[in-house]
Amino acid sequence: MTLRKLRRGSWPIQDRLDLHGNNTDAARSLLQEFLHASIQHGSRCVLVIHGKGMNSKGGEAVLRKLARHWLTQHPQVLAFCNAMPGEGGSGAALVLLKSGPGAVEN
């Protein structure tokens, strides 16, 4: 039900991060810092733009695969899905963060 609501755009996007042009180490660090800051600010829904890999060597979407893997591992990520077409489609992930008591870890 939560994922269905996320896909339908029930939560407004409160912040966004664009990972285009970053190598994997920089992208991972930026994503971790962004998620931490978003949680600290009480954001519930954020957009992570990772691209579709069309300009990558071999046309492989390296950042897309890695970003989704990192989101799966993050303890404060409740759910994520492809963004709406106007927000990047499969080149971006709409991320729902946990809220309420215990959502922020120090």
Image (cartoon, helix red, strand yellow):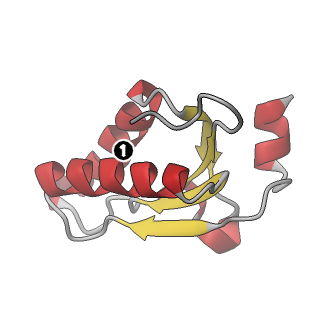
Residue 98 spot, x, y in % from top left: 64, 36
For residue 27, side relative to residue 33 (left or right): left
Residue sitting at 66 percent across and 54 percent down?
A: 45
Q: Considering only vertical position in the picture, is 72 above or below 16?
A: above
Residue 57 position by quadrant: bottom left
Residue 60 visible here: no
For residue 95, side relative to residue 2 (left or right): left
Q: Which quarter shows the N terminus? A: top right
Residue 47 position by quadrant: bottom right
Residue 59 spot, x, y in % from top left: 25, 56
For the residue labelled by badge 1, is the local secondary structure a helix, a strand or a loop? helix
Tag 1: amino acid: Ala
> Which residue matches tag 1?
67
Q: Considering only vertical position in the picture, is 41 above or below 61?
A: below
Residue 27 spot, x, y in % from top left: 23, 55
Q: Nearer the viewer, residue 3 or 40?
A: 40
Q: Nearer the viewer, residue 19 or 31?
A: 31
Residue 66 visible here: yes
Residue 30 spot, x, y in % from top left: 27, 58
Residue sitting at 59 percent across and 34 percent down?
A: 103
Residue sitting at 39 percent across and 57 percent down?
A: 34
- How many marks can you see? 1
Q: Which quarter shows the C terminus? A: top left
Residue sitting at 68 percent across and 39 percent down?
A: 99
For residue 58, side relative to residue 13 (left or right): left
Q: Residues within 10 Å of mark 1 (few under 14, many from 20)?
A: many
